[in-house]
Image (tube, rainbow, N blue to C red):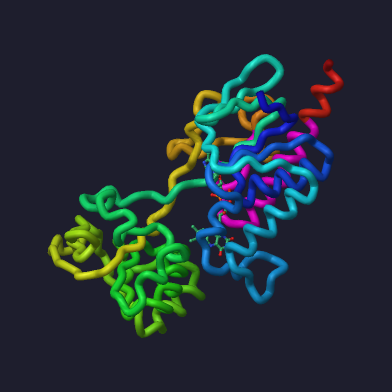
Amino acid sequence: MNEADLVIVGGGPAGLTSAIYASRALIDTVVIEKMLPGGQPILTTFIENYPGFPDGISGPEFAERLESQAKKFGARIVTSQPVREVLQVDNGFEIKTEEETFFAKAVIIATGTSPRKLNVPGEDTFTGRGVSYCAVCDGAFYKDKVVAVVGGGDSAIVEAIYLTRFASKVYVIHRRDQLRAEKILQERAFSNSKITFVWNTVVQSIDGNRRVELLKLRNVKTEEISELPVDGIFIYIGSTPNSSMVRNLVELDENGFIITDNFMKTKTPGLFAAGDVRSNTFRQLATAVGDGAIAANSAEKYLGELIWKH
Ligand SMILES: Cc1cc2nc3c(=O)[nH]c(=O)nc-3n(C[C@H](O)[C@H](O)[C@H](O)COP(=O)(O)OP(=O)(O)OC[C@H]3O[C@@H](n4cnc5c(N)ncnc54)[C@H](O)[C@@H]3O)c2cc1C
C-alpha cells in the first residue's frame, strides 16, 4: 500500500497550495489527481484578478507554475486516478482509487466542482459534438461559426467574449433579464458587436444530425418557443461539488458542499477540506489558495499532535 503522512485529494489551486505548504514543512505529501494537475485554471483563458499579476496570466501557465512549485518542495503527484472513497481506519484514512489504495494519517479534500449540466434532451448525445463546457479547449473549432453560450455569471461572460475571437456570432442565452457577471465584464460584452443577448430564455433541447445544428428555446416570460440555428453551445450555468467520496465522514450543506470551520476542519479529526468544494465560500483562485494554505497548516498541527500522543 502507498503510505504518506498527508494525502491531498485534488490537484487544483487549493490542493497544490496545500501541497506547497505541507511539503515545504517537510511533511511526506501525496496529491492524488483524477486528471492532470492544475484544476479549473487549465480550462480558463485568462486570469486578471489574481494578485501579483498586474498584466494577467493565462490559466494553463498559472496551473503549471503551481504544479512545479509543489514538486520543487518534494510533493508527489499521482495523476489520472479519480479517488472513489475515503474511509476512516485505525490511525488514519484509506484513500481508494480504482487502481490503488493509499494510506494517510491526514487527508485534505480539494476536489473542487464540476460544471452543472442543463439536463435537456440532446445535451449528452452531442457532448463533444457541439456541446462543450470549456471554451479554451474547444473554442478554436468554431472559426467563423455561430455559437451560443448559456449563463449570465462571470464564467459565461468571460468565455463568451473569448469565443468572439473565433466565432462570427455569439448568442448569450440567459434565463433572467440581467447578468450576474461583474460590471466590467458586462460592459465589455455589451460593447462587443459579435455578441447578441437572448434574455429571459432557457434551452429546451439541443438538436442536430451528427453534430449540433439547432437549439429549441423557451421564453420564460411569454412561454414562446423559438428555434436558433447554431454550430455549438457552451454551457456555463454553475457547478456542483465533487464531495461524494467523503459524504459519510463530513457534514454537507443542502447543495452537497463540505462544511468546515475556519481552520478547514471537517467533523472528522484529521480530515480537512479546502477550495471550491467547501460550503459558503467565494469561489475564486485567491480564496482557494488561501484555504489550501490554512488546511495545510491545520494538517501540520494535527500530525504534530499525533506524534505527541504516540
Ligand atoms: C471558466 C472559468 C474561469 C474562471 N476564471 C477565474 C478568474 O479569472 N479568477 C479567479 O479567481 N477564479 C476564476 N475561476 C474560478 C477558479 O478557477 C476556482 O475558484 C478555482 O480553480 C478553485 O480551485 P480548487 O482547487 O478548489 O478546485 P478546482 O480548480 O476545481 O480543482 C479541483 C481538482 O480536483 C480534481 N478532482 C475532482 N474530483 C476528484 C477525485 N474524485 N479524485 C481526484 N481528483 C479529483 C479535479 O480534476 C481538479 O483538478 C474560473 C473558473 C472557471 C470555470
Picture coordinates of residue 276 (x, y %)? 55, 47
Quick one: quadrant of the N terminus? Answer: top right
- Write the residue at 43% across / 74% down: 161
Would you say 9 lies left or right of 19 here?
left
Quick one: quadrant of the C terminus? Answer: top right
- Write the residue at 20% across / 70% down: 229
Picture coordinates of residue 194 (x, y %)? 35, 81
Observer-nearest of 275 and 178: 275
Picture coordinates of residue 105 (x, y %)? 72, 25
Vertically, is 188 above or below 280?
A: below
Residue 277 seen by the camera: no
Would you say 290 lies left or right of 38 here?
right
Vertically, is 40 above or below 303?
A: below
Observer-nearest of 65 and 202: 65
- Write the residue at 24% across / 63% down: 201
The magenta segment is: 272-301
Q: Is residue 176 on the magenta stretch?
A: no
- Write the residue at 41% across / 84% down: 191
Observer-nearest of 44 and 263: 44
